[in-house]
Image: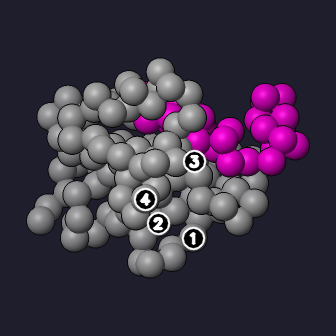
Amino acid sequence: MTVPRNALKKWEKVREFALGLPGAVEEHPWGETVAKVNSKVFVFLGVDDGSHPLGVTVKLRDEAAHAHALTAPGAEPAGYGLGKAGWVRIPLAEQGAPVAELLCDWVEESYRVIAPKRLIADLDAR
């Protein structure tokens, strides 16, 4: 399975944005890429080796953002029971998939749900 270039570019932008947030670190549990803050995942980035479709999974507590994310082509509540807690998986290669800027907004919202207040203050001070 080849990775569509536009989807890979979006994935790289989202990954770079996520890792630029205060205190964010990249880890690779279960062989997939995640960004964590304070030892907690705030975005699942999956794998970029073409073995699975590219996508991002974010936690959206804001009802409007959550509903909007679910309207993206192929988007669905995340598996393993995470969907019940507001996690949404958004595929990147689908026709009409969200643009990188919107995905980054959702990553930032997910970060704000998970990050400690002092790091959110750092982000707001930027």
- Look at label 1 and name its amino acid: Glu
Q: Give the magenta part as a residue range.
A: 102-126
C-alpha gap between disc 2 and disc 4: 19 Å
- Label 3 sits on a secondary structure element that is helix
Is 99 on the left-hand or right-hand side of 94? Answer: right
Q: In this figure, which residue is indicated by the disc labeled 1?
A: 27
Depth order, front residue of 106/126: 106
Q: Are marks 3 and 2 in contact (CB under 8 Å)?
A: no
- Cβ atoms at labels 1 and 2 below 8 Å apart: yes
Which residue is denoted by mark 2 in the rendering?
Answer: 33
Identity, as a three-letter code, of the amino acid under mark 2: Thr
Residue in view at x 44 percent, y 78 percent: 30
Q: Residues within 10 Å of mark 3 (few under 14, many from 20)?
A: many
**What is the secondary structure assignment of the residue under circle 2?**
strand
Circle 1 Cα neighbour tier, 10 Å, few/some/many (<14 / 14–19 / ≥20): some
Q: Does residue 86 sit above or below 1 in this rendering? A: above
Q: Earlier in the sequence, mark 1 or mark 4?
A: 1
Which numbered marker is on residue 81? 4
Q: Residue 125 shows which numbered tag? A: none
Q: Position of residue 106 (x, y in %)?
A: 50, 34
Query: Which badge, 3 or 2, comes first in the chain's sequence?
Result: 3
Q: Which residue lies at the image location 52% right of the left edge and 48% below the top edge?
A: 85
Decide if residue 117 is on the left or right side of residue 20. right
Q: Is residue 63 magenta?
A: no
Q: What is the CA distance from the residue labelled 3 to the residue labelled 4?
A: 23 Å
For residue 18, which numbered disc appears in the image? 3
